[in-house]
Image (spheres, rainbow, N blue to C red):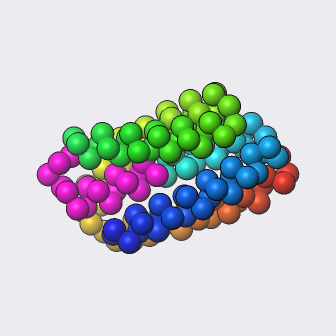
Amino acid sequence: MAFILFLHVGITAYCLKQFFTMRDQTGFHLGMNIAMLTGGFFGLMTGIVFIDYFPFHFVLLTMVAAVAGAFTGAVTGLFYDIQTALSGVSNGFMMGLMGPMIGSAAGGFLMLPVMLEIVYLFLTVLALTSVAKS
């Protein structure tokens, strides 16, 4: 599970670099979707993986996942404007709150984070290819 989190951090860092270089070509609606995508999935994956490793620290892990998702959404949103950052923060925070709940309900089932990572990869590739059309 830690490998999945490290993979997610690497993919997110690469995507943030790409989105930063293409920020002038990106429309505000796509920018908002990108901020919500990165912040939301980062909070979700952080919560799922951390609750698997530390199952008895639910409250602390929920706060860490929510702050991590909100921070990632804010950083991505500030590439575009303050309203986009607000959307990224709110979505990252809410998905960070849901991550530990979903992770504890899954009970260490490895296919859940793998499937979410595949969905995240698909959506980021879709967002990267949509920049030229926005």
Q: Residue furthest left?
A: 56
Q: Residue at x 34, y 52 (%)?
A: 47
Q: Quadrant of residue 94?
A: top left
Q: Quadrant of the N terminus?
A: bottom left
Where residue 26 appears, as percent x and y from the top left, is 78, 45
Where residue 127 appears, as percent x and y from the top left, is 70, 55
Within the magenta stretch, is there residue 55? yes
Position of 121 compared to 47: left or right?
A: right
Where residue 129 appears, as percent x and y from the top left, is 76, 60
Magenta span covers which residues? 42-58
Q: Residue at x 34, y 68 (%)?
A: 2
Q: Is residue 98 visible?
A: no
* Observer-nearest of 53 and 74: 74
Looking at the picture, does residue 48 appear above or below residue 25? below
- The secondary structure making up most of the magenta span is helix
Looking at the picture, does residue 24 appear above or below residue 116? above
Where residue 126 appears, as percent x and y from the top left, is 70, 59
Q: Is residue 18 visible?
A: yes
Looking at the picture, does residue 23 appear above or below residue 6? above
Position of 66 compared to 32: left or right?
A: left
Q: Quadrant of residue 123?
A: bottom right
Position of 128 compared to 95: left or right?
A: right
